[in-house]
Amino acid sequence: MDAMPLANTEDRYGWIAMLLHWGMAGLLVGLVVLGISMVRLPDVGFDQEKITLILVHKALGMVALAVAVARLLWRLTNALPRFVDGLPQWQEVSALFVHMWLYVLMFLLPVTGWLMSSAGGYPTPVFSWFNAPDLIARNEHLFHTLIAVHRWLGYAFTLVILLHAAAALRHHFVQRDATLRKMIPRA
């Protein structure tokens, strides 16, 4: 069996695209679960569990932003594999539309979280390595607005991720084409 190439080919994604895709998928699912878990905890004074979850969520969000930059740069410098033969044009357009929104939301969510922390006067630690600089001055009204924006973007992102996963599974199990196999490493 031939070794998998690092870069994308006309027929499938390369190792780097797969690593970025599946690594980001795991990171994003973890961030969504973490985000939902931490906001369900009550706001009662100093709650160490909630504060720890928020700090981990912020740090992972900043990692997600860095990986999103890497993904976008890789995607802009590597040709995408072609669509499977016989795919209706509306599905090609839908796939491009969903991927566009995945990328938009991969950037909007961490940036709104970072802006929210800045507006609230809270640090944005990237683990214990460093604190990201504030993007804007403290502003209580904007802080509360950004909380709502970040939450609704999170809901939208969850829906887009589910739509993307459902389409991939439909291609794999119903249409039985190579769409999903192009993103899975060969055994």
Image (cartoon, rainbow, N blue to C red):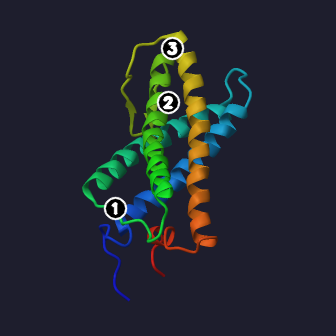
The residue tagged 2 is: 113
* Circle number at residue 80: 1
Among the 4 quarters of the image, the one containing residue 185:
bottom left
Q: CA distance from mark 1 to mark 3?
A: 39 Å
Of the image marks 3 and 2, the number of the one nearer the N terminus: 2
Residue at (38% x, 22% y) in the render: 134
The residue tagged 3 is: 142
Q: Left of 60 or right of it: where is 42?
A: right
State yes or no: discs 1 and 3 in contact (Cβ < 8 Å). no
Residue at (61% x, 31% y) in the render: 51
Which element is circle 3 on? helix
The amino acid type found where label 1 is placed reads Leu
Of the image marks 1 and 3, the number of the one nearer the N terminus: 1
State yes or no: discs 1 and 2 in contact (Cβ < 8 Å). no
Residue at (67% x, 38% y) in the render: 36
Q: Left of 123 or right of it: where is 2?
A: left
The amino acid type found where label 2 is placed reads Gly
Extreme-bottom residue of the structure? 1
- Mark 2 neighbour density, 10 Å: few (under 14) some (14–19) many (20 or more): many
For discs 1 and 3, the disc positioned in front in the rendered view: 1
Among the 4 quarters of the image, the one containing residue 48:
top right
Q: CA distance from mark 3 to mark 2?
A: 12 Å
Which element is circle 1 on? loop
The amino acid type found where label 3 is placed reads Leu
| Residue 181 image position (x, y, % from top left) | 49, 72
* Quadrant of the image containing the N terminus: bottom left
User: Which residue occupies the foreground of this view, 12 or 116?
Assistant: 12
Q: CA distance from mark 1 to mark 2?
A: 30 Å
